[in-house]
Amino acid sequence: MIVKNKVIATSSGRPTFFYKGNCVTISILPTLFHTGNVNESLGNIHFRGDVEIEGEVKAGIRVEAEGNILVEQALNKATMSASGAVITRKNILNSDISAGIHTMLIVELGQMLQTIHHNIEKLSTLLKQLVLSSSFKSSHVSSNNLQPLIHTLVKKKMKHLPSLVKKYAERIQKEEANIKEKDWREVGAELLTLFLTASTHPVSLHTITQLNHKIKQLWS
């Protein structure tokens, strides 16, 4: 919470900062402390925060963390997967290490959205021109429901846009466990509704402008 322009934590843990454009998200990651070794008798570790292990991580064990992983002893044929860093004080023997997953994923998703954003901007420009034209005013298409016109324009002018949207949505679905912010998923759902479904939900220029604003906030 914020008290007199200061951010005060209401729970224990490690403070983290996530930058998105001009906005900064501050959160507290809890820490799981494990004394001794991690072996088959204990099982795998999955934790929504940092993980610190005082002993070794034995063969066949998988440790997953949304924060950092710190192992004081050796890794032996184990699998480490962290959104942040993976640190070990001793040897790493035949182990699989994946670090910075969240950061790399956000960069990849941002690049996809940047391309989609530019395409929707072009689409918006075309729609504005058509809505203001005399032929549109004499037609039976409502400015509050441009869905049929959108599908026609995409089919004729932007055939590649649906495949871009599909690729983004599939990536979101595949990496759902590694995506912390719901905004990425919400934008994916809106894009699918707009470009890849036969939705009867009314779509106006304002709807498209608002969606493109959300997209730009994510990638910029």
Image (tube, helix red, strand yellow):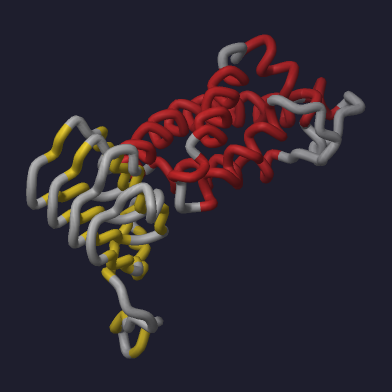
Q: In this view, which residue lies farthest toward the bottom?
A: 4
Q: Of residues 76 and 14, which is closer to you in this image?
A: 76
Q: Of residues 72 and 159, which is closer to you in this image?
A: 72
Number of numbered discs overlaid on the protein picture: 0
155 shown above or below 34: above
Judge whether residue 93 can be spotted in this image. Answer: yes
Residue in the picture at 24% in, 66% down:
35
Residue in the picture at 47% in, 28% down:
118
* Residue 116 percent across, percent down from the top left: 50, 28
Q: Of residues 172 and 96, which is closer to you in this image?
A: 96
* Residue 199 percent across, percent down from the top left: 81, 33
Check the picture and name the quadrant holding the C terminus.
top left
Rendered image quadrant of residue 36: bottom left
Q: In this view, which residue lies farthest toward the left?
A: 90
Q: In this view, which residue lies farthest toward the front?
A: 41
* Residue 104 percent across, percent down from the top left: 31, 37
Residue in the picture at 56% in, 35% down:
173
Q: In this view, which residue lies farthest toward the right?
A: 140
Check the picture and name the quadrant holding the N terminus.
bottom left
13 shown above or below 166: below
Residue in the picture at 21% in, 47% down:
86
Judge whether residue 122 can be spotted in this image. Answer: no
- Residue 58 appears left or right of 141: left
Q: Of residues 107 and 58, which is closer to you in this image?
A: 58
* Residue 95 percent across, percent down from the top left: 22, 34
